[in-house]
Amino acid sequence: MKKPLKIMLAVLAVLVIGGGIGYGTAVAAYESMYSRGTVRNGQWATNLAAGSAEASIYTRANIALHGLLALAKSETVYYQCLGDDKGEQLRSNCDYRIEGNAPDARWWSITAYGQDDFLIPNEQKRYSFNTNTVKLNLDGNYVIYLSGLPKEGNWLPSGTKDQKVALSLRLYNPGQPVYDNPGGIELPRITREGCK
Amino acid sequence: MKKWILWTALASFLFAVIVHVGLVSYIPYKAMDTVMNVRFKDLPRNTMNPSPPITEQSRNVVRPSPDILYTICMYDVSKKPLLFTCKLPDGYWSASFYADDTDNFYVINDRQAKSKTVEILLVGKSTPVPDAGGAIVLRAQSDKGLALIRVIVPDEKSLPGLIEVQKQATCKQVD
C-alpha cells in the first residue's frame, strides 16, 4: 500500500474508532444512575453532590441534562426512581401503587415526568403530590396511584401516550438522618399492579 | 505493517479519551448556555422575570416543579454589581445562584434570612465590592449566570398573594 493512502486510512480509523468509542463511553457514563457519589436506596437513587462544585464531571453532565438548576444538598435532596418492585422501568401503560409515609423534611413532593423530562399532559392538570396536597390514611401513611386511568384517592395521572415515566422525590430542608444515611432512610415503595 | 496498526490503535485510544472527557465536561456549559441564550433569549438581563405557574406547557428547563413559583434573573456582573431585593412570603422561600457551569454556588432560604426583606449584592469575579449597606455580599463564581427565586405554593388560594410577592422581587445594577 502506498504511504499517503496508508496515512489517510490511519487518520480515518482514528476519527471513526476513537471518536465512536469516546462518544459512546461518555454517553454511557453520564447517563448511568450509578456514577461516583450516587447512593442507592431500594427503588430510589440520589447523589448528594448534585448541584454543587463537588459533583464529578459525570454527575454534573447528568444533572445538566435531567435536572438542570438543581439545588445544592444543603437546601434540597433529590431522589430519582429506578424502577418498580420488579426492577422494571416505569411506563405510562401500567398502574402503580406508591406507598409511604411523610419523609423527614420541611416539605416534600413526588412528581411524575414523561420520557422527555417534562410534566405529563393530563386533563386534571395534576403532576405531583406533596406535603400539602396528599391525602393521608388514618395511620398517617399515604397511597398514591400512578395510572393513566382515574383512581379513587391520590391519583397521579401518567397520561394516555405510552411512554417511560420518571418519578422525582424532592426533600426540601431534610432532617439530619437524610444526610447521615441517604441510602437507609425509609422511602416510598412502588408496586406494579398491572399493565394494559 | 504491525507498527502501523499499533500507532493507529494508540492514536485512536488517545482520541477516544479526548472526546470522552471533552464531551462530558462540555455538556453543563452547553446546557446553561442553551437555557440562557436560547430558551430565555427574550428575557431581559439583570432584571427579575416572574414565571407563570408551572404546567405541562412549561418546557424551558427540564424537570420543573409544578408546586413552585419561580422568578428568574439572568445576571451579567462583569461590569456592575447587581442588588437583589426580595420580600419574603409566610411559607417557604429561597434564592439560589447558579454559575455558567451549573454549580449552585449560593442558596439562602426564609429560615436563614435575618428579616422579612432579603438584600443580596452580587459582585463579579474580579470587580471591586461597593458599599453594600446591610446587604449580603456574594462573589459570583462566573460573571454570567442565573438566579432563581423559589416559592412553594401550598394551595390554589395562596397563589394570587404569592404572585404579588413574586412581582415585588427585583434585581438591579448598582454603581
Image (tube, coloured by chain):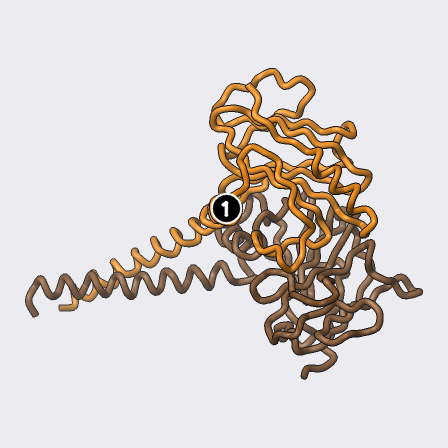
Q: Quadrant of the C terminus of chain A?
A: bottom right
User: Which of A38/B106 is in front?
Assistant: B106
State which quadrant residue B139 falls in. Answer: top right
Residue B150 position (above or below residue A159): above
Tag 1, which secondary structure? helix
The tally of labels here is: 1
Chain identifier of the brown chain: A
Q: Image point 68% across, 63% down: which residue?
A: A112
Q: Which residue is mark 1?
A: B32
The residue under the point 82% across, 38% down is: B90
**The N terminus of chain A sits in image quarter:** bottom left
Q: Residue placed at 81% from the left, 46% from the top?
A: B158
Give left or right: position of A42 versus B143: right
**Residue reaching furthest bottom?**
A196
Residue B19 at x, y percent in the picture: 35, 55
- Name the image quarter holding residue A145: bottom right
* Chain for colour orange: B
* Residue B151 appears left or right of A11: right
Type of residue at label 1? Answer: Met
